[in-house]
Amino acid sequence: MLGIALGNWQQGRAAQKLAVQEKLAARAAEAPVALGPSLTPPSALEYRRVTVTGEFVADWPLFLANRPMAGRPGYYLVMPFKIAGSHTHVLVMRGWLPREAEYGKLPAYSTPAGTVRIEGIVMASAGHVMDLGAAAPLAPRAIVQNIEPQAAARATGLTLQPFFVQQTGPDQPGDSLLRVWPSPSSGIDKHRGYAFQWYALAAMALLFFVITGFRSGSKQRDAGKRNAETSDAGSH
């Protein structure tokens, strides 16, 4: 039944997020590692705490739209970061900025100059939202719905690690970026609640069919009995 299938899907989503939660807890207990220039698959470092030394490519900011925080609309600021002593870069999700009342007007922010050391968590994805219409081309200061490292590498011409670093610190003087990142494991109870609702609807549907089927069968038996009695009366 559809209700059971949807309930199983919600249970599967809850199990996936529970696995992410367990992985996050295990990674959080590990000491941060220094991210180097060697290209590394996301699975090897996902959710790992890292430190990176280098400098921001300040002329290539990208703005991920439709990223609300505490009910306020806004953007994630994403910027390439050149890893010190190499030509390898990594996309850094620097933080959240509020959206201006005039859509398309970009919020103000500051970027530290020169060599800096940042801390963060490796993320395989920056999250995905539904693209409303054709995706905007990647260009400096572009407002986009989604970003993938491979597409960013083609647009920028930079060698990029195939993942993101979600910056957690340090905060810079005058830094207006917020870094209260949503947990990728959030919503486990919500999925379980939805699963319960779908299972309950499936049970109600089954009960409905059983009851209506029983009533239909009873009516057919009663009708058959009346027909038989009428036939017997007519034969006498």
Image (spheres, grey):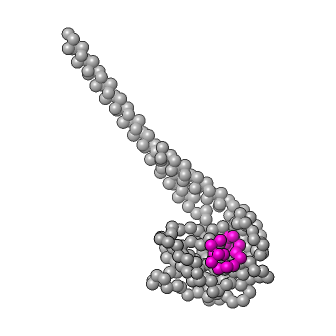
- The image quadrant that residue 21 belongs to is bottom right
> Which residue sits at x=65%, y=71%?
150
In the image, 170 versus 82, the foreground residue is: 82
* Number of numbered discs overlaid on the protein picture: 0
Horizontally, residue 121 falls left or right of residue 221, namely: right
Horizontally, residue 208 falls left or right of residue 51, namely: left
Task: Identify the magenta region.
Answer: 150-167
Horizontally, residue 50 falls left or right of residue 218, namely: right
Residue 198 percent location from the top left of the image = 48, 49
Decide: is 27 above or below 142. Answer: above
Horizontally, residue 236 falls left or right of residue 173, namely: left
Residue 87 percent location from the top left of the image = 75, 80
Most extreme residue toward the right, as rendered?
85
Quick one: quadrant of the C terminus?
Answer: top left
- The image quadrant that residue 141 belongs to is bottom right
Residue 65 percent location from the top left of the image = 53, 75
Q: Is residue 35 magenta?
A: no
Most extreme residue toward the top, as rendered?
236
Q: Is residue 151 magenta?
A: yes
> Which residue sits at x=42%, y=43%?
205
> Which residue sits at x=52%, y=73%?
135
> Which residue sits at x=47%, y=47%?
3
In the image, 170 versus 213, the foreground residue is: 213
Looking at the image, can residue 166 be seen? Answer: no
Decide: is 49 above or below 177. Answer: above
Decide: is 6 above or below 64. Answer: above
Looking at the image, can residue 126 be seen? Answer: yes
- The image quadrant that residue 62 belongs to is bottom right
Residue 18 percent location from the top left of the image = 63, 57
